[in-house]
Image (tube, rainbow, N blue to C red):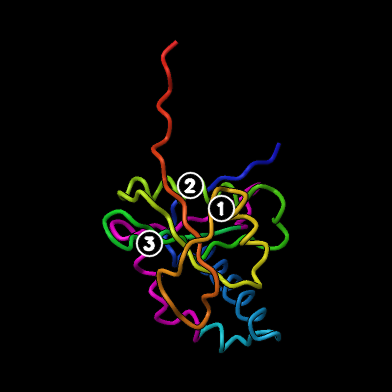
Amino acid sequence: MTTWSVRPERYDTPDATALRRDYYDEVASRYWKRPATRAEIDEGLADDGVERLSVPTGEFVVGRYDGKAGACGGVLMMDAEHAELTRVYVRPGFRGTGGGRALLGVLEDAARRLGARRMVLNTRLDLVEARALYVRNGYAEIPAYCDGPYMEIWYGKDLKKPQEPQNP
């Protein structure tokens, strides 16, 4: 049975870079209702703050399915107790295989390790697959905690500590 392997990875490895480009291409193309150009993708990724997605301010992960890079995501600490979920992306050919759920689990664990007690995120209304993923995994709509041109809906989730194994 093929499963997902999701692990921390630098944001600038070849797989991570390709996933970040695919992510930006999809979200920009959907927003503009036309294909994004290579130059637009380059511009969108330039100085986007991704370097903050490393310990101690965050973490970036890459998910592999049957060894192939198919998903990525990041968590960014906003303050001592709040983390933001960002750049969550599953390539279209890998959707429906559990990659989104696997990403969220690993990113929530990373946020807990970094000290977060609550995860928040913002997204757009047209990103229906992402919104459905968040709701299926316990995220609920919350009031806006930030603003910007690409933010239309906000979600949050309390991060409970993982259950300790019980001794028999």
Of 91 and 107, nearer the camera is 107
**Label 3 sits on what residue type?**
Leu
| Mark 2 vs mark 1: in front | 2
Left or right side of 90 for 148: left
Of 140 and 20, nearer the camera is 140
Q: Earlier in the sequence, mark 3 or mark 2?
A: 3
Considering every residue shown, the one lying at the far front of the view is: 143
Q: Earlier in the sequence, mark 2 or mark 1?
A: 1
**Label 2 sits on what residue type?**
Val
The total of numbered circles placed on residues is 3
Cα gap from disc 2 to disc 1, whole angstroms? 10 Å
User: Magenta residues, as a range?
Assistant: 43-70
Few, some or many C-alpha atoms within 10 Å of disc 3 (few <14, some 14-19, many ≥20)? many
Q: Residue at x 41, y 73 (%)?
A: 146
Few, some or many C-alpha atoms within 10 Å of disc 1 (few <14, some 14-19, many ≥20)? many
Residue position for label 1: 63
Of 113 and 144, nearer the camera is 144
Looking at the rendered image, the quarter that the C terminus falls into is top left
Q: Quadrant of residue 57?
A: bottom left
Few, some or many C-alpha atoms within 10 Å of disc 2 (few <14, some 14-19, many ≥20)? many
Query: What mark, if any, has residue 76 been given in the picture?
Result: 3
Marks 2/1 in contact by CB < 8 Å: the verdict is: yes
Residue 7, how many percent across, how many down? 48, 49
Cα gap from disc 3 to disc 2, whole angstroms? 13 Å
**Label 1 sits on what residue type?**
Gly
Label 3's element? strand
Left or right side of 74 for 78: left
| Image vertical order of residue 42 relative to residue 26, above or below | below
Residue position for label 2: 106
Label 1's element? strand
